[in-house]
Image: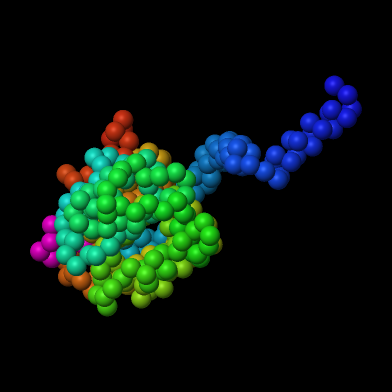
Amino acid sequence: MTMLGKFGKKYDEWRRKTLPQSINDANWRHEEIRARLIEIKEMLVPHFVQSLAGGTQALQDELRATLRLLEPQKAVSVNKTRVGSAGDGGYVQLDDLSGVIHAFSFGVCDDDAWDLAMAQAGVPVEQFDHSVESAPSSHPLLHFHRKMIAAQCGSDRESLAALVSKFSKSDTPDLFLKMDIEGWEWEVLDSTPDDLLAKHAQIVCEFHDLSRLVLPHFYSRAKRVLEKLYRLFAVTHVHANNCVPYNLIANIPLPDVLEISFASRARYRFEPSQETFPTRLDAPCSPNNPDYILGAFRF
């Protein structure tokens, strides 16, 4: 190869890495970065988790105080039900949709069984996922948007605050939120004002990266989010995603990904729960492995 040819090849590689010109180039760059991050994670995570196993008493006390915000409660005179798929993508929630006029589903991918079940129950569902071309199911009450959910609106993104302002029609909670957006939930919930978040009768959400609670910046935001949710909602159900490892953080065993169901304090009355988790309504996210045992989930 000539010197000019070698230079041209290096230029093309540089251009593709730094200035993607097409969707194929962008996808190629994305996959390259993703593969590299996975390599780095595999090298660092064992050392990272090991370093957190002991921690300090002060750190453990602080984490336990925050985790107590997630202590499950029982909604008085309201049963729970499972909605959606039998495994990953199904959620346990209160069996009550009275007064709910609209639902949001953030994160669709290849499973919108929850969305379809809600639509079949008569609740219109706005579906959002920027990573897929379309939703897998079709129903007159399902409305798919190829946009990501973020803190601020944009040409390719939408915010929870804007959606609540658009679809809520009452001073009482009349919306339902399902969210599984791979870690963006912290930013979205942190940026949504209390009065708009309170418009939801129920929220079912998968929370990611709990192993990062020991990192000061992440912990500060997570604490703000959990305190906000605690003011407005009670936790009615918890379930660990068994597709990812359990961690020992300051000697507290904690799943890295946790599915949490919330119900409005303005809409329901609560009493201490006597349940242990998982319950008969739960199913492993990965059917090839048994569920994680959370017990009473009290700290």
Residue 227 in sight: no
User: Residue 10's x, y, as percent?
Assistant: 79, 34
- In percent of the image, x 25 and y 42: which residue is there? 85
Residue 159 location, quadrant: bottom left
Count of picture labels: 0
Asked if 32 appears above or below 6 in the picture, the reply is below
Q: Is residue 31 magenta?
A: no
Asked if 65 appears above or below 183 in the picture, the reply is below
Q: Locate the C terminus and report the quarter of the image it occupies.
A: bottom left
- In percent of the image, x 50 and y 64: which residue is there? 153
User: Residue 211's x, y, as percent?
Assistant: 46, 50
User: Residue 9's x, y, as percent?
Assistant: 79, 31
User: Residue 96's x, y, as percent?
Assistant: 16, 60
Q: Nearer the viewer, residue 61 or 136?
A: 136
Asked if 248 appears above or below 163 in the picture, the reply is above
- In percent of the image, x 36 and y 60: which residue is there? 67
Asked if 265 appears above or below 6 in the picture, the reply is below
Q: Is residue 76 magenta?
A: yes
Residue at the outermost right position: 3
Residue at the outermost bottom position: 171
Per the rendered image, the range of residues in magenta is 73-79
The colour scheme of the drawn protein is: rainbow
Q: Locate the N terminus and report the quarter of the image it occupies.
A: top right
